[in-house]
Amino acid sequence: MLFAVVALIALLVLMIGWGKVPPFVAFLLTALAAAFCFGMPLDQVVKSMEKGVGDMLGGLTAIICLGAMFGRSIADSGAAQSIARTLIGAVGLRFILLAMALTGLIVGIPLFYSVGFVVMVPLILTIARRAELPPVYVGLPLLCGLSVAHGFLPPHPSPAALVALFGADTGLTLGYGLIVSVAALAIGGPLLAQALKRFNAVPQALADAEASLVIVETPDEATPGAWNSFTTALLPVVMIAATTALVFALHGPSQARTVITFVGQPAVVLTLSLIYATFSLGVLRGQPFVGQMNRYADALKDVAGILLILAGAGALKQIFVDGGISAALGGWLGALPLHPLVLGWLIAMVIRVALGSATIAGLTAAGLIQPLMAATHVDPNLMVLAIGAGSLMFSHVNDPGFWLFKTYFGLTLKETLLSWTVMESLVGVVGLICVLGLSLVV
């Protein structure tokens, strides 16, 4: 059975990595292959796959779609740039790396990674040019902040999906994730940037004025105020943290506890945050309401691919469960002389190296490690973070983020490996160390 499972994962990797099969289709084909390989009754195969898709998307579709719309409001309004300018103005050039790292983490909470990257690059290049500093030195801490938010913090797709799969608590995962994120960001951001100050390449966006990568930075007067920007961007985090703390403080069932628990649900938090952002960053600043709704519609188109990946991963996971594969796999994994958190991290890392996608790596690893969770009683919140850390490891030439960084910053392949790849790997390793440390005290 173990050989068959390895062969199925290899099939998935080959279809996505070599054959360029869309991930959704690749997951479905692998699920069918698994069902036939392990002798599932034919009349149960489709029902099982449908159940997996429904279970996976049932609680996540609203979260991811609302998150995408909320992130678009932060990006299009210029709030992200306002946050960056405020932090840099507060600390000055002496602590610019710290300001950039904090900017990346704060902006990375509401924004999907690719959106945050494109939105913040013009500001990075502007600051680097004005301060006469190498763009990689200035930009790496900010991009590291975006990366740790993407890997560790709900409501980003992979952490949110893992929270649902493992039955973790969003508030606790977010709290632990912030601790891990700050530690990983300090090492992979400002500290690594100090070692890379010699990388003084000329970004393509500056070298070629005709390049398609040229992006116009939003003027200062067109961006919302600092207080408005910070309040809106951090509202989901504050609400989740506050409601989690209040639920713990209120002992025993009560009407107040029920209401607070309801308000603290991620979908409710993001709905309220989106309504607030629509007015604070839009309507009250003279932006047409209809124009904002059109931008939200565009944001929903951007997450279609993510939702399909989640659906495919859910189908494969359910075939593993209903076919008895998960139970057998859980027994085998439990016999390995590795801590479950390390094992989850390792599986996610291997798939990340093979496929390049952190989201696919996290979801696939979760489906494999899930049967081990009940047997070992490992903290599900920490398993979410361990798999998230593994899914960030060793980004290289099969990761679109690798090429974005190389192209935007005008680096050679070797320089990109020594900067971007090392940064992602440091975040993954430090993340695992922090998770293991937390497991000793929680």
Image: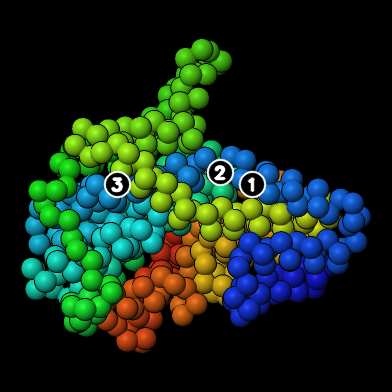
Query: Which residue is painted at 23% across and 71% down in the image?
Result: 214
What amino acid type should be assigned to the residue bearing mark 3?
Ile
* Side of 47 where 25 appears, left or right: left
Residue at mark 3 to residue at mark 2: CA–CA distance: 21 Å
| First reached walking from the N terminus: tag 1 or tag 3 | 1
Mark 2 near mark 1, Cβ–Cβ under 8 Å? yes
Crowding at dot 2, Cα within 10 Å, few <14 / some 14-19 / many 20+, comes out as many
Residue at mark 2 to residue at mark 1: CA–CA distance: 7 Å
* Side of 55 where 417 appears, left or right: left
| First reached walking from the N terminus: tag 3 or tag 2 | 2
Residue under numbered circle 1: 56
> In this orientation, does residue 45 appear?
yes
Mark 3 near mark 2, Cβ–Cβ under 8 Å? no
Q: Position of residue 144 (x, y in %)?
A: 33, 63
Residue at mark 1 to residue at mark 3: CA–CA distance: 27 Å
Q: Quadrant of residue 212?
A: bottom left
Report the quarter where the N terminus lies. Answer: bottom right
Residue under numbered circle 2: 60
Secondary structure beneath dot 3 equals helix
Crowding at dot 3, Cα within 10 Å, few <14 / some 14-19 / many 20+, comes out as many
Viewer-side residue, 326 vs 58: 58
What amino acid type should be assigned to the residue bearing mark 1?
Met
Is 260 above or below relative to 157? above
Q: Residue 74, which numbered label? A: 3
Q: Position of residue 231 (x, y in %)?
A: 25, 37
Q: Position of residue 138 (x, y in %)?
A: 20, 68
What amino acid type should be assigned to the residue bearing mark 2?
Leu
Crowding at dot 1, Cα within 10 Å, few <14 / some 14-19 / many 20+, comes out as many
Query: Which residue is painted at 81% across and 48% down in the image?
Result: 47
Query: Which residue is painted at 86% across and 50% down in the image?
Result: 44
